[in-house]
Image (cartoon, grey):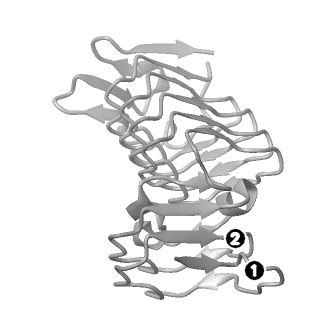
Amino acid sequence: KISFGSIEGSRLEEIGERAFSGCSTYTTLNLGTGVKKVEYYAFYSNSKLKTVNITDLVAYAAIDFEEYFSTPVYYSKSITLNGSNVTELDLPEGTTKIGSYAFYRCYPITSVTIPRSVTSIGKNAFYGCSSLESITIPNSVTNINDYVFYGCTSLSDIIIPKSVTSIGEWAFGYCENIKSIVIPKNPTNITPLTTNTVFLLIFIPPMRTCLAFLPSVSRTSLRKSSELALS
């Protein structure tokens, strides 16, 4: 078992590059509230890690994970809050951001509720959360970064609030069961809706479901069973 930042008075704020790379014997990681940044490959090849326990969702969501080998959830595939498995992720008010890779491939999560205090969702934050069925994005979020909900194959409905000004590449890529998407009626301020190149918000081979934002927003294209609603 390894514990970080869980001891009262701990000053540990950063876990360095490759700090625990190749450590394949421990099974439990306790991650306290002091850690703010985890660098490249920090937990690379920690193949026997089964449990990642946190004590504070606000503090955890604010951690800057450099990439997927730096987040221990990549190996545990789940996360516990004070010993209880997290399935319905209800982030409390006071959460200001959701960091990149925070819940990367956290399979047990079925729903995510984001408070109005959050303005940005980091890249790959919920990548591969295949059990995720519903997300609530408040009208405070301005940025949905690259690959945020990529591979969330259980998602069926998406509502993009009017506050959003930027949607990253493949933000909802390979969400195979999307039935409807709600975007603002006049989304002219959303990047890349205003770019000159075709941008695929959703792409599922073999083109069973495709929402393509074209240079002219009025030419938004949907295929087959998908539905687009303008709010």
Mark 1, mark 2: which one is toward the viewer?
1
Residue density around tag 1, few if under 14, some if 14–19, many if 20 or more, within 10 Å: few
Residue at the spot 58% in from the left edge and 53% down from the top edge: 80
Give the quarter of the image for residue 140. Answer: top right
Give the quarter of the image for residue 166. Answer: top right
Residue density around tag 2, few if under 14, some if 14–19, many if 20 or more, within 10 Å: many
Q: Is residue 187 above or below residue 64?
A: above
| Discs 1, 2 touching: Cβ within 8 Å | yes
Residue at the spot 42% in from the left edge and 38% down from the top edge: 172
* Amino acid residing under circle 1: Ile
Quadrant location, the C terminus: top right
Q: Is residue 132 above or below residue 30?
A: above
Q: Say which element carries label 2.
A: loop
Return the x and y of residue 230 as percentages of the image width and height.
57, 15
Quickly name the residue at label 1. Answer: 7
Q: Which mark is residue 101?
A: none
Identify which residue, 9 or 130, lies in the foreground. 9
Q: Say which element carries label 1.
A: loop
Identify which residue, 225 or 11, lies in the foreground. 11
Return the x and y of residue 168 as percentages of the image width and height.
49, 48
Q: How far apart are the two marked residues, 1 and 2, measured between alpha carbons?
A: 8 Å
Residue at the spot 37% in from the left edge and 75% down from the top edge: 46
Q: Is residue 92 left or right of residue 125?
A: right
Identify which residue, 199 or 82, lies in the foreground. 82
Quickly name the residue at label 2. Answer: 32
Which of marks 2 and 1 precedes in the sequence? 1
* Amino acid residing under circle 2: Gly
